[in-house]
Image (cartoon, rainbow, N blue to C red):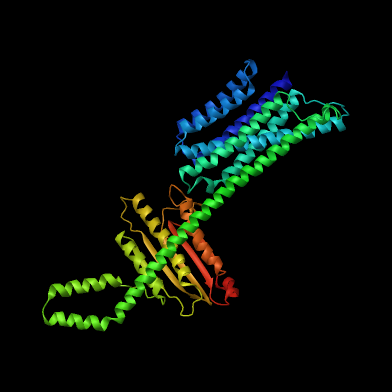
Amino acid sequence: MIQELASVSIMILCYLGYICAVDKFCKKYLEISQINERVFVLFLFGGRGFMNFMNRYCVIPDIFFILLNRIFFIGLVLLLFQRNTEKKILAASILITVTTLVQNFFVSFLSCLALFYLHTVKSIAVPFLREREFRLIVCISLVIAVLAIHWAAKHFVSVFYCKTRKWYVILAIPLLAVTAVIDVANWGASKGILIRSGGNMGLYYDQILSHAEFCVLTALSMFAAGFYVFGMDQIYLEQKKSSQYHLQIAAYKMLEEQYGRAERLRHDLKNHIIALLGLLENKEWEKIENYLKNMEGSAALGTREEITGNKIVDVLLYQKRSIAEEKNIIWECDVHIPGICHINEFDLCVLFGNILDNAVEACERLQRGRSESGSQPFINIQGRMVKKCFLLEVKNSADMTDKNKVKSAGKENPEEHGIGLLNISDVVHRYNGVMNIDVQNGVFLILVLIPLGNAGHDIKQAV
């Protein structure tokens, strides 16, 4: 009796640990109030106890209770947590899949070991696992499942962010299908549908073969589910990067065309002056005004403080400065690109464009979050040669105090900020450079160091 109470108590403690892990996982990717969180924990614990009681004393197929338990869990997540429905379904699906696969694998694996021990060490010809021993195996498997959920909470960040609602559903459905296959296999095993040797090898080997079958089935299912989830995430990320890259190519071409128009205007400046003098002599003031406006529009003329040594980067910085000034952001820029620069102009635009786009967005978020504050956000850009390397240093105001929150950056979809950083990283690595990011006292800092020519050996000295 005492041993029975002890095993039940251990199972309850393990299940409480499982509930805590589930709650932590859901809170990381979804939102919930304190009251709803308490209701979630209470119903999850009470519902499991009620299901076990009904399963034990009601003459209803086990598969019905398994299905009811899945629906009950998904329903709790949908009702009590916030965020869009598709994301909640995915979170519930991942938790169900991880728990089911890990627990089933280790139950079968540990059962094999226990039967092997009883047969070889204890010399029992046809060993069977008693209920107390099976409960212990279930408890150990549940503890391992809890560890797997903690691991998933750390490594599934990109899966939950920067995705469309349709993508969450596409990811959730195969996971639930895999879980359903395992549930049906479990139900069949509980009804005596096992791998048998045809009576030639005996009941002991039949048990070993059946547990080994489950080990293989769940191991393959875990591999397939993991490959599918992370593979789909990588495909989505690559598509997102490719899409943004093509947008940057279009922007680069637009800058190139704009610069070409300005060059043509300078080339024809003598002719324009002659035309203006003719209008001036005839005192046609309105035509002079229209003529000058056409000249300004055709070349995007304006006061440009950015004389970097690269004409395309000058145009890009001019555009970004105009956007910053419209949004009441302080702009400070001192960039000097060396005359002999092996960095492709397109890559320079990707580098500057992504960094400055992120900086402007960070300043905007800061303004929205501190609408009553009198402080004005700023962007500071410094670029220069350092020991045969090009050093780009950009600082901007940001509503962040923790370096680990860089990728979340206050957006609903944290990885959107990360796409820009990935494009920057691609350019930096293409030229064997280094990149460093830091956040201190509400200031976001990104440092990029790229060797010019054969200066790769100078990077460590420059840093």
* Residue 21 appears anywhere in the view: no
User: Which residue does the image show at 52% across and 31% down from the upper left?
Assistant: 74
The image position of residue 20, as x and y in percent, is 57, 34
As drawn, is 129 to the left or to the right of 302?
right
The image position of residue 205, as x and y in percent, is 82, 31
The image position of residue 227, as x and y in percent, is 62, 47
User: Which residue does the image show at 60% across and 74% down from the upper left?
Assistant: 457
As drawn, is 393 to the left or to the right of 274?
right
Task: Reply above or below: 156 against 284.
Answer: above
* Residue 3 appears anywhere in the view: yes
As drawn, is 295 to the left or to the right of 263?
left
Q: Nearer the viewer, residue 320 or 367?
A: 320
The C terminus: image quadrant = bottom right
Residue 291 occupies quadrant: bottom left
Q: Nearer the viewer, residue 135 or 222?
A: 222
The N terminus: image quadrant = top right
Residue 62 occupies quadrant: top right
**Looking at the image, how many numbered discs can be counted on the residues?**
0
Spot the residue most to the front: 198
The image position of residue 2, as x and y in percent, is 72, 20
